Amino acid sequence: MASISTTLPLLLSLLLLLGRYHAAQVPQPERGTYIVHVAKSEMPQSFEHHTVWYESSLKSVSDSAKIIYTYDNAIHGYATRLTAEEARLLESQTGILAVLPETRYELHTTRTPQFLGLDKSADMFPESSSASDVIVGVLDTGVWPESKSFDDTGLGPVPSSWKGECETGTNFSASNCNRKLIGARFFAKGCEAMLGPINETEESRSPRDDDGHGTHTASTAAGSVVSGASLFGYASGTARGMATRARVAAYKVCWKGGCFSSDILAAIESAIQDNVNVLSLSLGGGMADYYRDSVAIGAFSAMEKGILVSCSAGNAGPSPYSLSNVAPWITTVGAGTLDRDFPAYVALGNGLNFSGVSLYRGNALPDSPLPFVYAGNASNATNGNLCVTGTLSPEKVAGKIVLCDRGLTARVQKGSVVKSAGALGMVLSNTAANGEELVADAHLLPASAVGEKAGDAIKKYLFSEAKPTVSILFEGTKVGIQPSPVVAAFSSRGPNSITPQILKPDLMAPGVNILAGWSKAVGPTGLPVDNRRVDFNIISGTSMSCPHVSGLAALIKSVHPEWSPAAVRSALMTTAYTVYKTGEKLQDSATGKPSTPFDHGAGHVDPVAALNPGLVYDLTVDDYLGFLCALNYSASEINTLAKRKFECDAGKQYSVNNLNYPSFAVLFESGSGSGVVKHSRTVTNVGPAGTYKATVTSDAASVKISVEPEVLSLKENEKKSFVVSFSSSGSTQDRVNAFGRLEWSDGKHVVGTPISINWG
């Protein structure tokens, strides 16, 4: 029998081990990244610097938490890792305005200048130093500096206003910047805090673009003129950005794991400090109130510094209420088509032909028709028709052409699946979600994408024919396609879900099948199996339309450097067009019917007209603060956006309807059959003295619209106000969305603003 002296230490050891085991089993509270917004003015006097206060406030709730970023321009505050309980405790402290969880944002993935009339109007845009003093900052996946789009030939010294730098890192040195690409930075701390260190064997921990998206957007906005550009011979011609003499500053905020709000805010912080003039963000992430939306918060700070912020509307169309980036101090851009197409005809064995599109260039198909099979009949999976990885039976598709339905996975990914199963080609059919909109891709095998109607007809043939056959005929590039532009089906739509009284999107620009610079680290499809390398790529998305507007804003800024961001946006919006040269209304690709302001905003951008808009609807920071008061934001919510104490005047009646916006979103209260809604506006004459007369058109029979006064006589730079009254008669006959337009004209200028009428 063992003595007590020997068993006691054993028991103690056992208890100690059990205690350690138990401790290991107790789950530790999960940590997440939070952005801490601070009222800097409330710093206790005992602290000599705000950063010391930040450290102290953080230490009071967590011994281990470290500051990831400190912000002073985009917001006042810092980013850190906390548990939910620590975040709650921190938010309750004096001087802490808000503790917001990290948000993950997504990217909104030659002929354009000609289509927009820029090639014929070179004399309207200065070749002077003012055009090359404008700096466009692009927040994206970085930049491929060797692209010819960033050639600095003919550009003078870097503008003296520039305060940024060229950061070094994986495969990127300071010598990669030049007089065109004047700055490049990368922001990975937020991404790494969430997902662990960047895998440098897969992506460059530097400003280098391994994705292609950032190079495409930057070169669209402000790429140099490159002759002989094309993708495999498609869209051959001269590639050029919108503002060819503007400088580019690239801010890499998007990684394989996404684009994180702490990194985006850090980039906006730097861009403000660096002195950019325009910020372009082709990304978005959900919908939140402005004081909880990091892009909206950072954009407010940029706007205060005179920087125009242009953002993509999103690719969640054609569903209503699908917009991103709807803050009124952001220019929100939808997407339309060009007058260019890449036809690839699908010829069936029964003699019927269907028009599709493709950017395939490679080994040709045999001259004779090939056996044709529907993917849904060549798979044992319930979703086999979608050609998802591992769903096709090789013995049923080998040597054939396969019809796949769109949905679930990327279009080019379906082609890769079909090819790896042994098939020779693919026809890709739209479903109801995409309608008749055709988006071309540089497929890995011979393939053509067709609309829903053609797809249905082709399926009918496949299901009724015992031995169906098909040929695909590639026709290259065709221009002069009409009607154009049409609103892209994928382009996100209004109404504005955050503030219905602000009409969004603001306008639309080319965003379908856009040729621009590309990264040599990745093939044109972006798929790992794609070993092809190209200088230029053709892709689609509101990601592509946004930099068009960013570059055009830079052009206008070079001609009118004294204009505010709101004045520049107003010029682009009030000169946008809503009808074709035939007088017919712009069309919506999703419906085949006329589009509305919820689809195209003020209309399609017309840069030449925007240089000389006649009148502008200007806005100051105080106007936006009044707007926040009208939303009944609390003092701390306003402070989060404005970075300072601002008290709404209790004796003043604030109204969202009176924000001086170049559009009218009229909201009648639900349940009230009749009523009057008034919107007041002020215009500034930026042209010669003139007399402007108002005309209103509307399809709302039960709403009477009047303008008071109907005539405005303005001297140069003079401001004058007017009120638009919308009177609902109480009739329920058109209690659906209704639309109209207000135009002021002096005989030379037409200053147009869209109207939407909604019963809440």
Image: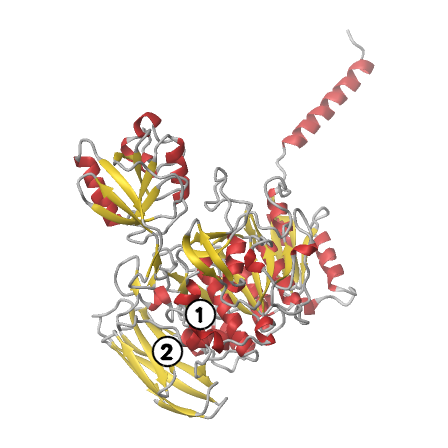
Q: Which of the pair 439/294 is nearer the observer?
A: 439
The amino acid type of the residue labelled 2 equals: Gly
Q: Position of residue 507 (x, y in %)?
A: 41, 68
Q: Is residue 656 visible?
A: no
Identify the residue at horizontal 40%, vertical 44% (top origin): 361
Tell me which corner region of the image, top left, top right, bottom left or bottom right, holds residue 305: bottom right
Q: Position of residue 522 (x, y in %)?
A: 52, 44
Q: Which of the pair 618/398 is nearer the observer?
A: 398
The crowding category of the residue bearing disc 2, from other C-alpha atoms within 10 Å (few below 14, some 14 to 19, many at least 20), is: many
Q: Where is residue 424 in the image (x, y as percent from the top left)?
A: 34, 34
Identify the residue at horizontal 47%, vertical 93% (top origin): 715
Q: Quadrant of the C terminus?
A: bottom left
- Describe the element under mark 1 as helix, strand or loop: helix
Q: Is residue 135 above or below residue 741?
A: above
Is 245 placed left or right of 505 in the picture? right
Instruction: Kindly report the distance in space between the C-alpha atoms of the residues bearing marks 1 and 2.
Output: 25 Å
Q: Residue 752 carries which label?
A: 2
Q: Where is residue 569 in the image (x, y as percent from the top left)?
A: 47, 73
Identify the residue at horizontal 27%, vertical 40% (top origin): 471
The amino acid type of the residue labelled 1 equals: Asp
Q: Name the residue under label 1.
A: 119
Can you name the residue that lies furthest to the top here? Answer: 1
Q: Which mark is residue 450?
A: none
